[in-house]
Image (tube, helix red, strand yellow):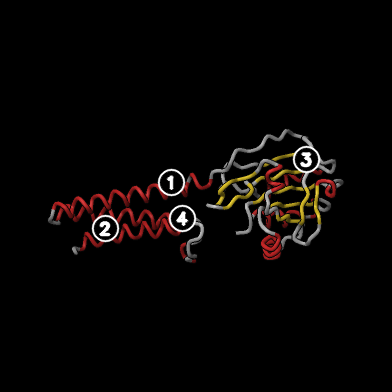
Amino acid sequence: MSLPVLVALAGTATVFVATYLFLPNAADVPVLSAGDAPRLILLGLGAGWSLLGTVQALRLGRGGFKKVMLSLVCLATLALAGASAWWVVDYSYRLPKAIEVKALDAVKPFSGTDQNGATVSDASMKGKAYAMVFTRGFW
Amino acid sequence: MELQVLQSVLQEDEFKGAAAVAVCGESQDVVKAGAEKAGLKFSVIGDSDLAIIDAWGLRHNDAVPGKNTARPAAFFVTAEGKVARAIQPDNYRTRMDAAAIRDGLRLAMGK
């Protein structure tokens, strides 16, 4: 296998790894886990290697079938890199529509058990100002 | 994490007397461990059946694939039980910062 083909396939593999690392249950790789930037850079590098290797292979290589297959792999790699980057940068951060709340509406009733086993409700909170925060969780 | 920012704001002298309640769609065990790890002194309700979250209309289906929970939102409530301010970001990237928490608490406290 020629060097350009190896570079192109290494790029494809890198894009797959970077995409996998964005999945919620992916293994934690400390150096790549601080925010989105490291993994987006990995996606970009993978796409770049794939494109560079494929262009060089098309220029210097032989065999029409190999070139067509490599071009298809490169196109798929670029599409995956683009889709992953779009999903991370935009779509995965979107939230459902906000609920309508007018200023000085009465707080909606609630009652639940807190981390200490105590019951907390709108009635028990009456008499003090408070922040009611809904959070996605502790992961 | 926003809840830790909220905790630190509540410890400021200006906000003595104010309180906070957090709701998340996790089990009691997860909430207890998470609240301890984050050093949260205020109440965190584990709403694993999403009863409160649904009653408030704040469910986010598949927030993480296969997991339903609450969309992030904060409501600053007066001592009389009226909502003085609501913060509902449209994107997870928009985080509630200390300044927004202080402003909300001031409004709720009538300052």
Which of the two marks, 2 or 4, is nearer to us in this view? 2
Quarter of the image with the N terminus of chain A in it: bottom left
Residue at which label 2 appears: A8
User: Which of marks 4 and 3 precedes in the sequence?
Assistant: 4
- Measured in 3D between alpha carbons, the distance from the residue under mark 1 to the one under mark 4, in whole angstroms, is 13 Å
Residue at which label 4 appears: A37
Residue at image position (81%, 44%) is B109
User: Which of marks 2 and 1 precedes in the sequence?
Assistant: 2
Q: Mark 3 lies on which chain?
A: A
Residue A107 circle label:
3
Q: How many labels does the image show?
A: 4
The three-letter amino acid code for the residue at tag 2 is Ala
Q: Which residue is nearer to you in this view: B13 or A18?
A: A18
The three-letter amino acid code for the residue at tag 4 is Ala
**Dots 1, 2 in contact, CB < 8 A:** no
User: Which of marks 4 and 2 precedes in the sequence?
Assistant: 2
- Measured in 3D between alpha carbons, the distance from the residue under mark 2 to the one under mark 4, in whole angstroms, is 23 Å
User: Is label 1 in a helix, a strand or a loop?
Assistant: helix
- Measured in 3D between alpha carbons, the distance from the residue under mark 3 to the one under mark 1, in whole angstroms, is 37 Å
Image-based side of A128 in relation to B7, left or right: right
**Dots 3, 2 in contact, CB < 8 A:** no
